[in-house]
Amino acid sequence: MEKRRFAELGLSPELLKAVDKMGFEEASPIQTAVIPVLLTGRDVVGQSSTGSGKTAAFGLPAIEKVDPALRAVQVLILCPTRELAVQVAEEMAKLALFKRGVHAVPIFGGQSYERQFRALAAGTQVVIGTPGRVMDHMERGTLRLDKLSMVVLDEADRMLDMGFRDDIEKILSAVPEKRQLLFFSATMPRAIQDLIGRYSRDPEWIRIESHAQNAPQVDQVYFEVDRRSKIEVLTRLIDIYDFRYGIIFCSTKIMVDELDEHLHARGYAVDRLHGDITQAQRTRVMEKFRRRGFEFLIATDVAARGLDVDDLEVVFNFDLPNDAEDYTHRIGRTGRAGKSGRAYTFVSGREIYKLQGMVRFAKLKIRRENVPSLDQVEEARENVFFEKLRSTLEAASFRAQDRIVDRLLEQGYASTDIVSALIHMMTSAPSAPTPEPAKAAPAYAAPAPASAPAWVEKRSAPAAKASAASAAPVSAEGADPAPVAVAPRKAKFDRSGKTGREPGFTTIFLNVGRKHLVTPADIVGKIAGVTRLPAGVAGAIDLHQRHSLVDVASEHTAKILEKMAGVRVKGEALKPAVATDANRAEE
Ligand code: ADP
Ligand code: MG
């Protein structure tokens, strides 16, 4: 598809400067095709895939045409959701940076009318909003559209899906006759063609074909993985490539919750989105994810719709998507705008046939790889540690410890041995207070075997090998039957140790014990999952017959007690309390 330099598209220097500042090197195909047509004043119907740069395609000409001296709304952009409205507004503000006197604001439900009213009264020229809120403002008289010269329907198909048809029609009938009308939509169902026919004047139809080739910058790989090993394989891939920012797609809400709990327990910074999550919570999670407040978002397709994030390093299809279209949609979120991204897809059992069907139908460029072995994981962790050490040395960002070093040298130790001993101390589990092996849950007792040192991680959250799945061997259904021990993130404490010894920790009492068949993993997983604190807040755990004592970080004790109350573990409703001499002695 043809692409051109922005300078060839007829835009003014102010806008070219903004585009340059945003780091855009060349116009995308939809931008190349749409911008010159819009500058002539024609109506346009544009069709291209997610992430193809539609916002700037309509945004640049829109800003070009705004008269800064006229303090009235001249451009109205309708978006299906508030998240999108906010994103489009942000992009518009960036594009308008060097064109003085041009302002863009989003208006959407949930935000105070007061604030929106002030922005509108101040003479903002570009308004971005959801159809519902725009209608409200029109009815209240706070949004006047008599000077409007351009209306954009962004993601028109989704707006209709969401039931905005009436509002859209009312808005379109209320705007001045002489205006440019733009439709952008991924699909062109009847209803949209209808609207176009009734409200557009001789529009130019621009369609950018999106085959699988539209994502050549996404490296697509699939793994044949036994269902039970998916979590293990997922964490290996994250560790090996040291991914920091991505989405993990699951097919059900239950799977999202489960995975969220497991990854939390293993010390990954994750959060989740699915259909049962309230709008307020959803907004919070999305916002946090966009500013990289956590590393991985676990989501269903539906929940992730409308989430427009850039710069994802990776998309995991933890569960296979339903069809090729969902697949392309999911992976389109990585490798945007010329950057390379990765998409990893897990298939188990007969799903391979479904994937093959998708590959044939949509000509996906996806290749098979073997599940990475534990050795590869260790090597990768070692590399991370090595890099960290090297860059500390390089930056000289450490305090000289001459006194200790000199003392050791004086005692005749070789400097290489001193360094090795230090690395050993940093990378192997600290010697725990003598555990009681008989009582301790076996899954926890053993520190990492000597052959697999648990390399100190860059990721700070320490975690235990909390999930049952991590103990399960990985059985790839393909050619790599690599037997697998466990690759735990380094645990700060041996959780089977005695409680009540670690400074900064408080021992709490839980009314579940061995009789209820709970394991320390269950407890850590529950605490991390319910409180959403990193798994490191839990330290040593003593399991007794009917109760357990758990060390938790003192600063979080109150929160943990509050959140855990009533939560069910193995069918028992928890009644957590701070451990006392009385309840310690129970049994
Ligand atoms: P769409 O609306 O088609 O889904 P967006 O307009 O949201 O796509 O653009 C996706 C991402 O690509 C945004 O981060 C945007 O800033 C970036 N982008 C848009 N055009 C270009 C370009 N020409 N070069 C580089 N990045 C671009
Ligand atoms: Mg868009």
Image (cartoon, rainbow, N blue to C red):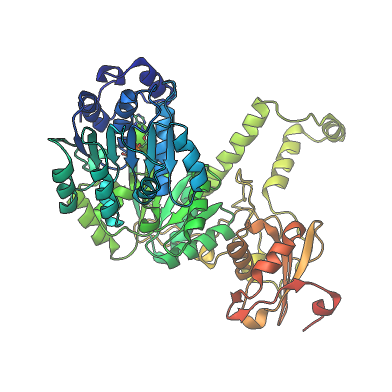
Relative to 517, is 81 on the left or the right?
left
Q: Quadrant of ligand 1?
A: top left
Residue nearest the viewer, comparing 94 with 385:
94
Residue appearing at x 35%, y 33% in the figure: 337
Question: Residue 525 at x, y = what percent?
Answer: 59, 65
Q: Is residue 212 visible?
A: yes
Residue nearest the viewer, comparing 118 with 102:
118
Question: Residue 539 at x, y = what percent?
Answer: 72, 61
Residue appearing at x 34%, y 25% in the figure: 66
Residue nearest the viewer, comparing 442 with 305:
305
Question: Residue 203 at x, y = what percent?
Answer: 15, 35
Relative to 453, is 47 on the left or the right?
left
Q: Is residue 376 above or below residue 104?
A: below
Residue appearing at x 29%, y 31% in the figure: 57
Q: Is residue 365 visible?
A: no
**In the rendered image, which quarter contains the N terminus?**
top left
Question: Residue 331 at x, y = what percent?
Answer: 34, 47
Q: Is residue 550 above or below residue 180?
A: below
Relative to 268, is 416 on the left or the right?
right
Residue nearest the viewer, comparing 328 with 13:
13
Q: Is residue 446 above or below residue 26?
A: below
**Residue 445 quadrant:** bottom right
Residue appearing at x 25%, y 27% in the figure: 35
Q: Is residue 409 above or below residue 68?
A: below
